[in-house]
Amino acid sequence: MTLPSLTTGQIAELVNADLQGRDDVVIVRLSGLHEAVAGDLCFIRSSEFADQWKNSNASAALVTRDVEVTPRPDTTLLIVDDADRAMIMLLDRVAATQTKIQVGVHPTAIVDPSAVIAPDAYIGPHCVIGASVTIAARVQLLSRVCVGNECTIGEATILHPGVVLYDRTVIGERCLLHGNVVIGADGFGFRPDPSGTGLIKVPHIGHVDIGDDVEIGAGSCVDRGKFGATTIGTGTKIDNLVQIGHNCAIGAHCVICGHTGIGGSTTLGDGVTLGGKVGLPDNLTVGAGATLGGGSLAHEDIPPGEVWIGVPAQRARDAMACHAVFRKLPQLSRTVKKLAKQLENTS
């Protein structure tokens, strides 16, 4: 990743690092240890990476303070409390230089006359804005965004190409929705037809309400409520290809990883973490601060603060104990067969 040219001294000041080596080395790129060349900055968070430093061609490295790294001639070490956090600060700096803030309505956009759009917002090419929509200051709709009737989008929110907001969706401030996110589609609800053939669709007339500082990854979907709201709490981060069903209540500052599916009317407390490919059926409750490991499938409520894993999901310590026994089953099976044969021979 290319940087605006910074010297090692400037970077040290930016991330509050202790400098070991030259302060005038010009850094032009962030890179990994293996692919780094002269002019690159890499980062070392553990002794494993420290061992790789001696063979790296990087000019400088951000190093977590308690990791021992042998200095090399003509290279610079920037010692920080947390190399990952320092790298995030640098990435923020790069992202700020790459972000292009635009203003106005592109001539190809279609905007209903009743929509209220802040003067410093941006409506990009081929966007469609419905009736009675409110779009706040510094909002960026990049292209091909479709905003249904009576939607509200809070300040400084960014919607990437292909995002679709169904009617009455509410998006908070400083949210980030990546490409092809769909908010407010019908929940998946059907009942058998009394005639005995086919299905009757259950109408969903609710909406989706998303808090501030929420990020939703590409291709994810949040369904609207049947007659109330599906809610996503402030600060929650949702990965790519996640499905959140109708009438779910997702708490604040949750982390939901890719390919997770959450059934309708399920509740997540604040600070819940769901690993990749987690499955939650309808009407469950996951308590605040709980964690479900990747690939877990829950069939019952998860108490607050606990870590559950497995299929079906159970407390991590119980799941690991079961797994230890499971691994011994082949040997146990052979032992049982051997004992059975011995009993047959002695009978």
Image: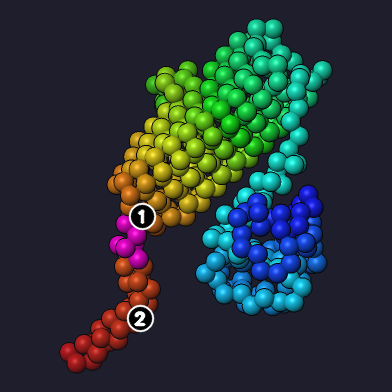
- Between 160 and 27, the one nearer to me in the picture: 27
Residue type highlighted by circle 2:
Gln
In terms of image quadrants, where is residue 194?
top left
The residue to which callout 2 is attached is 331
- Between 180 and 45, the one nearer to me in the picture: 45
Instruction: Estimate the x, y position of residue 257 in percent, counting from the top left.
Output: 52, 48
Magenta span of residues:
315-320
Relative to 106, 82 lies left or right: left
Residue 137 to residue 94: above or below: above
What residue occupies the far top of the structure in this picture?
Answer: 114
Q: Residues within 10 Å of mark 2 (few under 14, many from 20)?
A: few
- Magenta span main SS: helix
Q: Residue at x 56, y 28 (%)?
A: 173
Q: Residue at x 17, y 89 (%)?
A: 347
Question: Considering the numbered disc 1 on the image, is that residue within a helix, a strand or a loop?
Answer: strand
Instruction: Estimate the x, y position of residue 90 in percent, counting from the top left.
Output: 66, 51
Q: Residue at x 71, y 58 (%)?
A: 9
Q: Residue at x 30, y 83 (%)?
A: 335
The residue to which callout 1 is attached is 307
Image quarter (top left, top right, bottom left or bottom right) of the N terminus: bottom right
